[in-house]
Structures are given as C-alpha cells and as structure tokens.
Amino acid sequence: MSGVLVFVDHTRGDVSNISTEMIGLAGEIKQASPGAVRMVLIGAAVAAQTELFNLEPVDEILQVDSPAPEFDASEYQEVAESLVRRYRPSVVLVGHNANGMAYAGGLAVALGAGFCADIFALRREDTTWIATRSGFGSKLNVTMGFPGKSVIVLSVRAGSFKAPMGRGNAALITLPAVAPSVRHSWTHERFIDPPSEGVDISKSEFIMSIGRGVQDEKHVPRFAGLAERLGATLACSRPVADSGWLQKSRQVGLTGKPAASCKLYLAFGISGAVQHLWGMKHVETIIAVNTDHSAPIFDVATFGTTTDLFAIADSIDKALDAKRGA
C-alpha cells in the first residue's frame, strides 16, 4: 500500500484552511514514501471548488457525489472505507475538528488501521511512520508508531502545516455516490449557523485575546479599543465567551476556532487551559500577560510578563499616543 488520501473538510461548501494545509503534509509524505496523493471532495456543495486543491503534490482530485446536502459522519466513513479499499493508500488524512473527529476513529476501527488524533508532525523512520501529538495536558509531546499496520488514519491539527503555493496538474475524477449499508435512525432537520460578527479569527495574522483576567464585562470595551488601535483581531478564551462578554465566533480553542493563520498572539489574562492552548500554541510569536507566574500559558509563550494587565494596556496606549504625537 502506498500514497495518501486527503479528505477535504467543508461546511456546506465553505472549505476550511485545514484542507489545503493537509496537502502540505501530503507533500511531505510523498517525498518520504513515493505514492499518489488523492484529494477527496464529498458532496455537490464543494464540487465547484476543485481548482482550490489542484496544487503541486496532488495527483488526482476525486469528486464523490452525495445524496445528503449536509455533512453526515456515517456517509463520510462509508465513502472513506470504499476509497481506501479501492486505492489502497498507506496514509489517510482528515482534519482534527468536529467533522473529522466524528468519523476518523470509526474509520480506523473499520479498517483495522493505525490511528492517531490531533497530530502536528509526522516523519518516516525506517519502514514505519512516527506521528507526534500533545499529551498530559499539552505539557509534553508524544510520539506514536504503528507497527504492523499497512494503513494509518491521522487527524491533523489546524495550523501545523503550510499549504503549498505551486499549482499542480491533477486529474479530476468523478465517482458515484456510495450506497449506504445501514439505514439511518435519524433525519437531518436543519443547519443552525453560529452567531457571527463578520470576523473569522482563523484568518487573522495578529490576534489580541482576553481571558478571565479582565475581571468584568465592563472592561471588555477597553481591550476592544486597544485591539483596534493595534490593528489586531479581538478574540477570547472560553470563559469569556461562555459568560456572553464576547460572541462564540471570537473564541480560540478546541471548542472555538484555531488561530490558524496567526503570526502574533497577544494574550491578556489567559491562564492557558489545554483546550485554549490547542488553538494557539503553534503560533510563531506568543506574548502572555498574566499575574500568575505558574499559569500554563507561559509554557508556550515566546515572551511573558506577570505585570498587571491593565498597567500593560495603559502603557501600550501611552506609547501609541506618543507615536501619534511625534
């Protein structure tokens, strides 16, 4: 078995960044162990966007018809099983998000494959693959091998790999829908869009994020104004979103969104729970402001200070005022 199957992640045709990031990983896999890279697009909603995935490492784009207009984990798993048996890849890649987690584990069990979730690195060692993921509350990295497994299923952490830039010459192949083997015991009623302020934090290169350290909702406008002055996108940790101080669309983390494109992350009053670190620990430059010197955020921060966050905010404002007056 050789090659890679990459499953495009999308919500009603809205393609997530992880889809092209996984092509970057597939390219690395192809260099270490030659084989065809095949992108899998399921459903009519994403059919018109095949050119997005015609990038340098991709050999074929498989467009699979689907009778279901919405994401269906059971359907994705059955399509994946069918394609793995047909093309016999050595690696299957899916995004590590709500969609991917809904079928990746079941797929691995059905195939008798090796499985590792939330990976952010992969290397070839002799004749096997070694995947890296976080463990023990993100306090250390764990490496996993897959002895005796001819195929492995991996869910990939957003923001861990770079999407390739070079255009490819992939063949487009249309495949019929896979007939379901089991009658579903549920019916899809409707899709409810999450509330949005018209901002997508996953596409921002500079994020200023606030946590419980801001103490009260009345202080949120203070930091919103600072973010605007800095040219940053305002984001938050889960407690802030759960309290209703900011909308859920601005939450960074496992139950929010990853800071996938972020290059500079400024964290005010965020302790650094595992779920939050999942969404931002990959960022190149992280600046943490927290009075608790033992806060986990400092384990991943590039720079940090235990100075009062309001004092830091005031100092930044004064510096910006001085710059404007100069």
Image (spheres, helix red, strand yellow):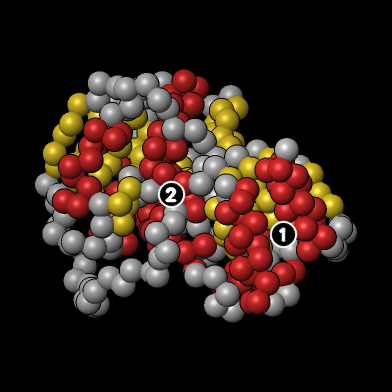
Among the two numbered marks 2 and 1 on one chain, the one whose residue lies closer to the N terminus: 2
Q: Amino acid at mark 2?
A: Gly
Residue ID for mark 1: 268
Residue ID for mark 2: 95
Q: Which mark is residue 160?
A: none
Q: In this picture, is 241 found above or below 258?
A: below
Residue 212, horizontal then vertical, whole percent: 70, 71
x 16%, y 55%: residue = 66
x 74%, y 69%: residue = 213
x 65%, y 77%: residue = 218
Whether residue 224 is visible, yes or no, is yes
Q: Quadrant of the N terminus?
A: top left
Residue at the front extreme?
325
Of 249 and 5, the residue lying toward us = 249
The crowd level at tag 1 (other Cα within 10 Å; few <14, some 14-19, many 20+) is: many
Q: Is residue 295 left or right of residue 92?
A: right
Q: Quadrant of residue 38?
A: top left
x 33%, y 27%: residue = 55
Residue 114, horizontal then vertical, whole percent: 49, 46
Q: In this picture, is 144 found above or below 182?
A: above
Q: Secondary structure at mark 1?
A: strand
